[in-house]
Image: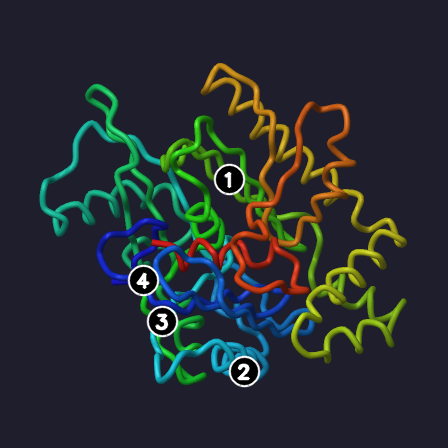
Amino acid sequence: MPALFPNSALQVRPRIAVEVRPEGVYAASATDSAGVLATVSTMALAAGAVVPSLRVGNIVDRIAVIAALRKTLSAVQAGKQRDVTLVIPDTAVRVLLLDFDTLPSKQEDVLPVLRFRLAKLLPFPPELAQISYQVMSRHALLLQVLVVAVPNEVLAEYESAVREAGFEPGTVLPSTLAVAAALDEAGPSAALLVNGSEFAVTTAILRRGELLLHRTLELKVDPMAAAAAAIALEPASVALAAGAGDGSNVAVAEVLHGVLADAGASDRAHEELLQAISVAAAYYEDSLAVAPTEVLTAGTLVPAALDQQLDGSGLQVREVLQAADLLTPTAVPHGLLAGLRGALRG
């Protein structure tokens, strides 16, 4: 059963991790459990190659994705190591925080209870999904439980692609939970995290390893329509970016973002991003009785641009992944490597 949590004690994490995103495939290795990235390899994907959702058909261009997995994983592979931690998009899973008065003491008795509860909460049958859970906190007579559910067929898409690339997925993590594992649990205050992609954003609040909020919002931007608009307006630039080698994810993101901004198509997505951060900040203040002062970013979010958008809010922007988390400098945006840092840690 895949371990879907940042700090699972069920197994020793592989020293190689790979994340499959709509923007590309990102792989890294670490020499030990500290998770500092020793080697990094990336390969861009054409728009629409990966369209994450809760339905079958996430990996649209299977040949391209498998080729990208094979290339990036081979570049960071140490010896004949084949086991990898696989990070998948947040929109391909459901992450919930549920309250229980009590749970059975035996793990095999817990899953039926969770499936019964999830039957009314999931848009897919829980009996046809991989379910994992972790008790987050115990307050008085109340248990708060983090539950992650992913449809079996969707999980199989990602896992089989890794296997066809010649590797074995040992642990599977949703993107934001992977990023969460990169945060310092000993920090004195809670963290407000924002993990973005071109078409979705997840906000999370964590306090000393405890997840208080996890909310994924699909932005109202159609990836196929965005790709078509980009190609129509900037065919040469987009083709060059999509076909380039390592590190070209920067060009793809910049071209798409620039074209959409010029066309005015991304205005609504920007508004939704800011609204998502505003809702998370309000929840932070209500729950912790103190206003957040900092936003930690991961994914495709550009800290400088977000900092400008948040000007006047009192929130400072800082990336999760710092230079000290890398053994060697890389041109790949740090936000796109934050999940790998967390996946390799611990």
**Left or right: 271 as drawn, with respect to 330:** right
Across and down, in percent, residue 240 comes to 80, 77
Give the quarter of the image for residue 207: top left
User: Of tags 1 and 3, which is closer to the observer?
Assistant: 3
For the residues bearing labels 2 and 3, Cβ distance under 8 angstroms: no
Image quadrant occupied by the N terminus: bottom left
Q: Amino acid at mark 2?
A: Lys
Residue, disc 2: 71
The one of 293 and 195 positioned closer to us in this rendering: 293
Which mark is nearer the camera, 2 or 3? 2
Q: CA distance from mark 1 to mark 3?
A: 26 Å
Q: Residue furthest top?
A: 289
Q: In this view of the protein, which residue sits in the foreground, 198 or 296?
A: 296
Of pointers 1 and 3, the one earlier in the residue sequence? 3
The residue identified by callout 1 is 215
Which residue is rendered at x = 33% and y = 63% of the image?
Answer: 171
Q: Which residue is mark 3?
A: 169
How far is disc 2 from disc 4 in space, using C-alphas?
21 Å
Q: Nearer the viewer, residue 218 or 300?
A: 300
Residue 166's x, y, as percent? 40, 85
Q: From the viewer's perspective, is the residue at label 1 or at label 4 nearer?
A: 4
- Colouring of the image: rainbow
Place of residue 316 in the rendered image (x, y in percent of width and height, measured from the top left)? 66, 31
Q: Element at badge 2? A: helix
Three-letter code, disc 1: Arg
Q: What is the spatial separation of the Cα atoms under label 1 and label 4, in whole angstroms? A: 26 Å
**Which tag, 2 or 3, sits closer to the chain's start?**
2
Residues at marks 1 and 3 touching, judged by CB atoms closer than 8 Å: no
Between the C-alphas of marks 2 and 3, the distance is 16 Å
Q: Between residues 54 and 193, which one lies in front from this camera angle? A: 193
Name the residue tied to disc 4: 13
